[in-house]
Amino acid sequence: MLQASERLLSKSVHDGVEQFREICERTRIVPDVFNLYEWSTWITPTILHKKRFETAFYLIALDALPKVVPEGSEVQQYFWDTPANLLEAHNSERIWLTPPQAYELKRLSYVHDIEQVVSFARNKRFAKGTTPLCPVAFTAADGVVLALPGDSLYPANYDLVTEHNAHEYVHQTMEELRRNVTLLHRLELVGKLHTKGYYQNQPALDDHLHLTGENRNFT
């Protein structure tokens, strides 16, 4: 059971009654922000125009498992596992990951040394910034393609707000859409929007980790 005070603090931040910084000052807690590294930024596709978000992902390495208090609205439960195991559970449809989660876990799954990942985030990624990833969704005959910046299907000079014809390729399979283009940077979703395909045949944006593990500049 959560302590009443923890529930109240979480609800206060969620409802906008009190800012996180104000709570930290009042409770004399100092977040370890100096070991928190910007990792990526994702924007909800325009096809989900009723409610869109810009979400920042951060990386932090922990020496021990912390006490976690699920917020209750955005987070209801949690568990710890490796990127590879989480992806396998998603692939077998035992859990569901949002496309950004699947994408980030996929490129982390190729690296097995946490100290190496932290060094990369701190020393190589720190000054690079992050290109916002706003997927452009296309319905195919056998699933959904989420095109990302650099993909041949991704609109040139995309402004992140213009809607497009999501049914333009509805009579082609995802394999045909792959075969008919030159540049790939996409996810392929099937069934209940489970990510089954990860494709990138060009350098990663901002010298980041590569979606298919081709991390030539990682070490």
Image (spheres, rainbow, N blue to C red):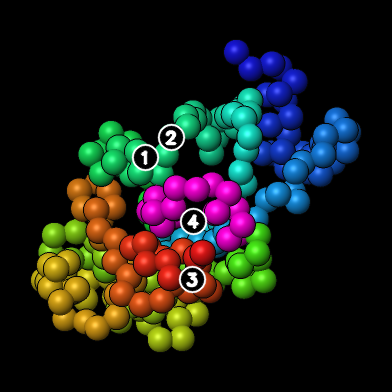
**What amino acid is at disc 1?**
Leu
Calculate the distance from the C-alpha at mark 3 to the C-alpha at mark 2. 26 Å
Q: Is residue 55 magenta?
A: no
Q: Residue at x 47, y 32 (%)?
A: 80
Labels 1 & 2 near each other (Cβ < 8 A)? yes
User: Label 1, on which residue?
Assistant: 86
Residue 164 percent coordinates (x, y): 34, 76
- Residue 101 visible? The answer is no
Crowd class of label 1 (few under 14; some 14 to 19; many from 20; radius 10 Å): many
User: Label 4, on which residue?
Assistant: 51
Residue 40 percent coordinates (x, y): 54, 61
Q: At numbered mark 1, what does the secondary structure look like: helix, strand or loop? A: helix
Crowd class of label 3 (few under 14; some 14 to 19; many from 20; radius 10 Å): few
User: Label 3, on which residue?
Assistant: 217
Residue 128 percent coordinates (x, y): 62, 73
- Residue 218 visible? The answer is yes
Quadrant in the rendering for residue 215: bottom left
Pair 1/3: label in front: 3
**What amino acid is at disc 4?**
Lys
Calculate the distance from the C-alpha at mark 1 to the C-alpha at mark 4. 27 Å
Q: Residue at x 25, y 44 (%)?
A: 91
Calculate the distance from the C-alpha at mark 1 to the C-alpha at mark 3. 26 Å
Q: At numbered mark 4, what does the secondary structure look like: helix, strand or loop? A: loop
Label 3 vs 2, first from the N-terminus: 2
Q: At numbered mark 3, what does the secondary structure look like: helix, strand or loop? A: loop
- Farthest residue, direction bottom: 156
**What amino acid is at disc 3?**
Asn
Specify whether 147 is left or right of 1.
Answer: left
Question: Bounds of the magenta span?
Answer: 104-121
User: Label 2, on which residue?
Assistant: 81
Specify whether 182 is left or right of 170.
Answer: right
Label 1 vs 4, first from the N-terminus: 4
